[in-house]
Image (cartoon, rainbow, N blue to C red):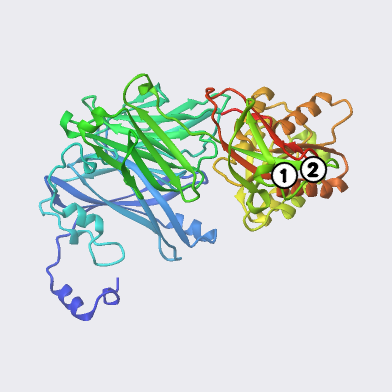
Amino acid sequence: MNVGKWMPKAALAAFLMLPAPLPAQTQSSTTQIKTPVKNFAVQTSVDSLGALDGKTVIRVRISSEEIARALLGKKISQYSMTLRGSIRNAAGAVVETLSYPFSGTLSPSSPIEFSFLRVLAPSHYTVEIDLGDGVKTYAKLQFPIDVPEVGRSFTPEMAPNDYSTLPSAEAVVLAAPKEEPVPAGTPAAAAQRVRILPPDREAPIGLMRLSAEVSPPVTKVEFYLDDKLLLARTRPPYTVEMDLGKIPRRQTVRAVGYDAAGNVVDEDAWALNEGDARVAVRILPIPAQSPSAGVTVRLSVQSINGGEAKTIDLYVDDKKFRSFTAPPYVAVIPAGLYAKASYLRATALTAEGQEANDIRFLKGQGAAMESVKVDVVQVHVSALDRSGSFVPGLGVDDFSVTEDKRPQKLTSFEVAKNLPLNIGLVVDGSGSMRKSMDFVHAAGINLFRDLIHEKDRGFVIEFRESPQLLCAPTANVGRLTAAVAATSATGQTALYDSVILGLYQFRATTGRKALVVISDGGDNHSWVDYATLLRYTRTIGVPIYVIGVDLGLTDFGIKAKLKELAGDTGGELFLTTDARKIPEIVQRIETELRSQYILSYRTDSTRPDGEFRAITVACRKPEVSIRTMRGYIP
């Protein structure tokens, strides 16, 4: 290395006069890192740097020229990844967990590499590493290391940063004087020891897998779905696979960590099926070590589809106790105040003004309740005159809404054209559509070219035996039309599953929403049945527009289901065999979406979740008729 490039001359001279440090003991080996594409050669080295508190500071370095060449071959010159993993002792127990973000720029002559420090007792260990983007794992690596005793004391200068002669921040922290133990019941004592990782694939129904990341002294994790214990794991991987059923419900997964003595150390929570919410919040009291220490409360704040909580408030009964604008969301409630309180409430507010709440009752019959959600119902309304044309210029006073025949007070009113549009296209790519694919391509391409503008978003799903998300929500019309053009017809038909996946893409979106389905209506390969699909549409509140292709005169059952599916959600069914009518159909859908009104109200219903609630929207102008959803299931 050309050290003169990095140092002033005076500093360089001083550096050269320093006594040379004792060489570190180094172990080197070559192994394989497993990826879905192929296995790549990886070089590993372990430097035993110095002694610290009776243990040895090691530096683990991993590099690969093969991975660098593969990335450069795909025109990728910069990378940003997340390293997660663990270090196990000879008995297989996890003694250290790893979590590091790393990034860099590639050059033809350099490998991709990263390194980290750890302090371990002399012994034999196994390093296990997962590489990914923080959500999904793309590669796995495992290799053994032996940590020896060393005679020299560790100093930060023994571990220079990879790109300078300055010691790394990690080395400085390791060598810093140790702080006095923090008393229990303070926020600093509540460092997070259990964390649920975002799932690779989040689904509203069916099977779902979640993993938890833990750190000592946690040796056991119990997973709960609401209050039901699913399983307990006493060694990594701390994962759970759960069946969410065929009906989407608001649920909470909790991971509770215990130490070797069976004491609760920490817990985390993950919210499922939060509807249109962009954040979720859960209250997690952490048991105190002594009655007088107070109760440490952690607020688990979860981003949904990119949502961000700007402020989080914690209330004890009806009085605000603490406000947060950044993590960690941890507060200590004095023991006396906690003992007198009846409930805790947390409120998370997004920049858009959306609110998420959680309440934990501490006394009485409500103490078993985990959360309470304030239900805000959003209704898409199309107003038509006697000729079937859409009526513009209506105001909030022109509408009335009832839920289960009870009048509701509108809390917001929006004209649709002022809001961004979120629209999805579900394309039937099954064998029964083979003769119609040219028609399907023309329909989908025209749809996105006509509807998607700068602030709008669209996505494409193709289905055969199972649905596939060909293009995630985007404003890029080129990507959307390319995804439509890539669809083809072969295999079985999983229409119902695909509509559910399409509706799920709208979670946490605001503004106008619509799902357009192009299909011949047949279904012979879905996991869910039609009744389950219909129930699911009522929980989402997104209008569905169905373009039925080549349906024969005798396809009465298919037509009836498609008509019900569209009508129940406030959409419409279009039947055609003539591709020349596609622009007319697309224009009709576009005009309706940009002419709608968005009404919102805060329901006063006391009926439990899971029961259908009928909605009626009326216009006070007798010449105007209303098309909207028939109701919803919270």
Q: Which amino acid does label 1 sit on?
A: Thr
Relative depth, front residue between 387 and 79: 387
Relative depth, front residue between 421 and 191: 421
Residue at the (39%, 51%) spot, across then down? 42
Alpha carbon separation for disc pair 2 and 1: 8 Å
Q: Please state the horizontal and vertical placement of residue 412, each as a whole percent of the image.
A: 58, 44
Q: Dot 2 surroundings within 10 Å: few (below 14), some, or many (20 or more)?
A: some
Q: Which amino acid does label 2 sit on?
A: Met
Task: Please say whether residue 282 is visible from this viewpoint.
Answer: yes
Relative depth, front residue between 92 and 217: 217
Q: Please state the horizontal and vertical placement of residue 596, each as a whole percent of the image.
A: 70, 45
Q: In the rendered image, which residue does mark 1 sit on?
A: 487
Residue at the (47%, 38%) spot, across then down? 199
Q: Please state the horizontal and vertical placement of residue 545, each as a whole percent of the image.
A: 74, 39
Please identify the quarter of the rendering in which residue 220 is found: top left
- The residue at the far top in this view is 365
Q: In the rendered image, which residue does mark 2 sit on?
A: 437
Q: Please state the horizontal and vertical placement of residue 180, each as a whole percent of the image.
A: 12, 45
Residue at the (51%, 35%) spot, across then down? 274
Residue at the (31%, 65%) spot, across then down? 163
Query: In which quadrant will I find the N terminus?
Result: bottom left
